[in-house]
Amino acid sequence: MRARFDIGPMVRKYSALPPERVKLIRDIADFHLSEVGRGIVIIFATGSGQAVMALQGLTRFLAARDELIDLFVIDMESMTTQEMKQSFGREFYGHGEMQWIRDGNVVAFLEAYGHEAEVLIQKYFKRLLD
């Protein structure tokens, strides 16, 4: 059995969205990619400054928009490498990785939050609305 740290307080502290707009996934078994119509998934690693910056940047962007897009914050510690690959087809490293989901499919992926992230977040967000 894996030890779990509750990411909820940390996510609430750094998110610019109200808690009711953020879906925390503490166990990957509770998340089904195929059930997401339009949404964004961020992989959150509590010990990662990059993940905190990614959460802050993404939620500030979403808070300034009228469109209500589902935001899923998945605890990185809830997945083994095998479960990451099984659920998403890739491995995550705790850099605040983001995936834009439309009709159960990943339409865009941001590997790490960096200086170009804000432009890419806007570009990928438009893919969800088209």
Image (cartoon, rainbow, N blue to C red):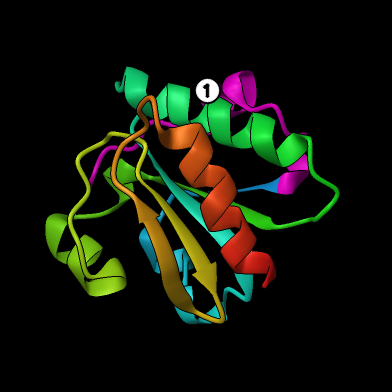
- Secondary structure beneath dot 1 equals helix
| Residue 98 located within the stretch drawn in magenta | no
Sort mark 1 into few (<14), some (14-19) or many (20+) by Cα contacts within 10 Å: few
Question: Which residue is rendered at x = 37% and y = 56% of the image?
Answer: 109
Report whether 103 appears left or right of 43. right
Q: Residue 71 in the image: state x and y as whole percent.
A: 61, 51
Q: Residue 87 in the image: state x and y as whole percent.
A: 30, 71
Report whether 90 appears left or right of 97. left
Tell me where residue 45 sits by quadrant.
top left
Tell me where residue 69 sits by quadrant.
bottom right
Question: Which residue is rendered at x = 49% and y = 60% of the image?
Answer: 100
Q: Residue 25 in the image: state x and y as whole percent.
A: 49, 52
Question: Which residue is rendered at x = 78% and y = 35% of the image?
Answer: 64
At label 1, the amino acid type is Met
Name of the residue lying farthest toward the left: 82
Give the residue at mark 1. Answer: 10
Q: Residue 89 in the image: state x and y as whole percent.
A: 22, 70
Tell me where residue 2 sits by quadrant.
top left
Rendered position, 83 above or below 105: above
Rendered position, 107 above or below 125: below
In-front residue for pair 63/28: 63
In-front residue for pair 21/122: 122
Rendered position, 62 above or below 125: above
Which quadrant of the figure contains the C terminus?
Answer: bottom right
Question: Which residue is rendered at x = 79% and y = 44% of the image?
Answer: 65
| Residue 5 located within the stretch drawn in magenta | yes
> Which stretch is magenta?
1-21
Rendered position, 13 above or below 45: above
Report whether 47 appears left or right of 117. left
